[in-house]
Image: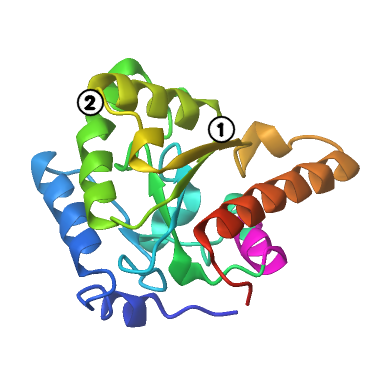
Amino acid sequence: MTIDWDEKKALLQEPNIAKVTQLCDELMEKKPGSVVPYIDPVHDEDECRIVSLQVSPGKGTESGFVSHYNDDEAARRATQIYELAELDPRYVMPWNAYPWVRDPDMPSALNVQEKTDGLRPFRQFLKINSRVSAIIAHGTDASTFLTLFEKTYHQSLKNSGIKIYKATALGGRAFAVSETKQEELLAKNVDVYKDAMQRAGIQHL
């Protein structure tokens, strides 16, 4: 499937994604010279019930977007999950704990400063997507980021009616295992999404 990224860029100001696009622009302005990939406009800030929280923008975001249509293994797995869970992408939205593109030479784990830098943007992101009822944290770093988020803002996401799910990262070392094990991990991820969908009352495609 060939994706026309220019076509997607033309949709970034549409009402379903405009506020998230604005947030990405503001984050780039705050760190001059930095890049925050835009969220693919297939997602919908009014319909979003599930946040798919990754750690930081991966290689595939060279497209300029955080998108399950990107050309990297994590994106391909996200596509598989959406298909197997029969999840319409407008009910879910991806975000990164550290939304800026990182230097590829840095260690893959986020440092404390990076996690701290990502807190306020995530809070703004949740305000835009006000109907979220589940956050799926992919990878340990995403989980610890959420713990820090709750501690910083003295806010229990649970009290806001948001359930946190812990899942494996969709790329890298998490899937550097045998094919059988990979299939098991994928199936577990699908189950997590199905549970989050059921909780949010999302109909299967």
The amino acid pointed to by label 1 is Gly
Q: Which residue is mark 2?
A: 153
- Select label 1 or label 2 by which is in front: 2
Quarter of the picture containing the C terminus is bottom right
* Dots 1, 2 in contact, CB < 8 A: no
Query: With 186 as the anchor, is 126 left or right in this view?
Result: left
Magenta residues: mostly which secondary structure? Answer: helix
Task: Depth check: give the residue in front, 92 or 73.
Answer: 92
Q: Secondary structure at mark 1?
A: loop
Residue 186 image position (x, y, % from top left): 74, 49
Mark before the other along the chain sequence, 1 or 2: 1
Is 69 situated above or below 127?
A: below
The image quadrant of residue 177 is top right
Q: Which residue is mark 1?
A: 139
The amino acid pointed to by label 2 is Tyr
Residue at position x 22%, y 50% in the image: 127
Residue 78 image position (x, y, % from top left): 60, 57
Give the crowd class for mark 1: few <14, some 14-19, many >=20 residues within 10 Å: some
Task: Depth check: give the residue in front, 113 or 106.
Answer: 113
Is 99 situated above or below 78?
A: above
- Span shown in magenta: 77-85
Quarter of the picture containing the N terminus is bottom right
Query: With 68 as the anchor, is 76 left or right in this view?
Result: right
Give the crowd class for mark 2: few <14, some 14-19, many >=20 residues within 10 Å: few
> Mark 1 and mark 2: span between their CA atoms?
22 Å
Task: Depth check: give the residue in front, 115 or 146.
Answer: 146
Q: Secondary structure at mark 2?
A: loop
Residue 103 visible here: no
